[in-house]
Image: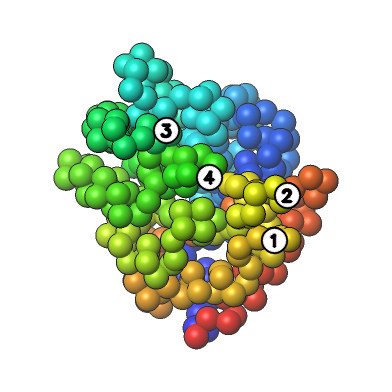
Amino acid sequence: MKRSWESVLTLSVVHFMLFPETMAGEGPVVESIEKLALDDFLGGVEITLIKDPQARAAVRSIAAQSGLKLGFGAQPVLLSSGTSLNNLDDAGRKRAVELIQGCIDQAAEMGCARLAFLTGPDPGDAQRDRALDLLADSVKTLCAYGADKGLALTLETFDRDIDKKSILGPSELSAAFAKRIREDYPTFGLMYDLSHMPLLHETAREALPLLRPYLVHMHVGNAVMIPGKPAFGDLHPRFGYPNSENDTPELIEFLQTLFEIGYLQDAPAETKPWVGIEVRPQGEEASELIWAQTKRTWRAAWSALS
């Protein structure tokens, strides 16, 4: 594999994780995005809700001037509000749908092509089928709303039993759910994250072929699986973090599997698929140093692909 990643994929970073002080839609949003835009390592930046209209205008200007593509992640909005698209309570579920509709409005304003979100918690065996039906209703409502705005929706799968405890979730169930939504909304797709893979007790060669028909976005990152250790759970520490699951060898295997299943191709389609990097500083770590380390890890992994 000697091709540059720029010729094969759109490489992005999850801005609100690398700079977590911006996750609530405030703080140094513009300044930190400008730092990323000045680095031609990236082709895209994944943003979330930005509260200040002037800041949104500044980010749009930065993206236009630098040639960055923008993606939108609504996961922080759902998580911080405690709302769920598969809430068994009608009023709670309606609130979650309304929040994501607001995110769709802003994503369209920012020129994003897709919006990513996650499901709510798994209610357990007895209520799971009902919750999946309610989730399907919510997602179809949002797909229709997004289509009117020229936006497609992406569902990111999360762990079932460690941190987020989401209903989706395990890859077999997620693939079946995506097939169900695609019957009415063909642009709907799934996002799978290397960080979540160990939390789901899965491997790349188990999960990715199963999900392949529905994959529209990938994330790469890391996780700690040992209870009581720093960064345990879904906290996205840097690659190679102490007691963690993923470093350069795991990233190599993940990328290699993406080529094997055809998500990545030596002769890419007209629209290049997205692979997003999702890392978060832990403790007193500095965002800029974590980003430098992450870029070195990515370059090492890419150069090792055969």
Tell whether label 1 touches label 3 (CB within 8 Å): no
Residue name at image x 59 percent, y 80 percent? 303
The residue that label 2 is drawn on is 230
**Cα–Cα span, label 4 and label 3:** 14 Å
Q: Quadrant of residue 120?
A: top left
Residue name at image x 63 percent, y 29 percent? 24
Number of numbered callouts drawn: 4
Q: Is residue 187 visible?
A: no
The residue that label 4 is drawn on is 162
Q: Which badge, 3 or 1, is on the more N-terminal residue?
A: 3
Amino acid bearing label 2: Pro
Label 4 or label 3, whichever lies nearer to me, is 4
The image position of residue 306, as x and y in percent, is 50, 85
**Cα–Cα span, label 2 and label 1:** 8 Å
Tell whether label 1 touches label 2 (CB within 8 Å): yes
Coloration mode: rainbow
Amino acid bearing label 4: Ile
Q: Label 1: state its secondary structure.
A: loop
Tell whether label 3 touches label 2 (CB within 8 Å): no
Tell whether label 4 touches label 1 (CB within 8 Å): no
Amino acid bearing label 1: Asn
The image position of residue 46, as x and y in percent, is 54, 46
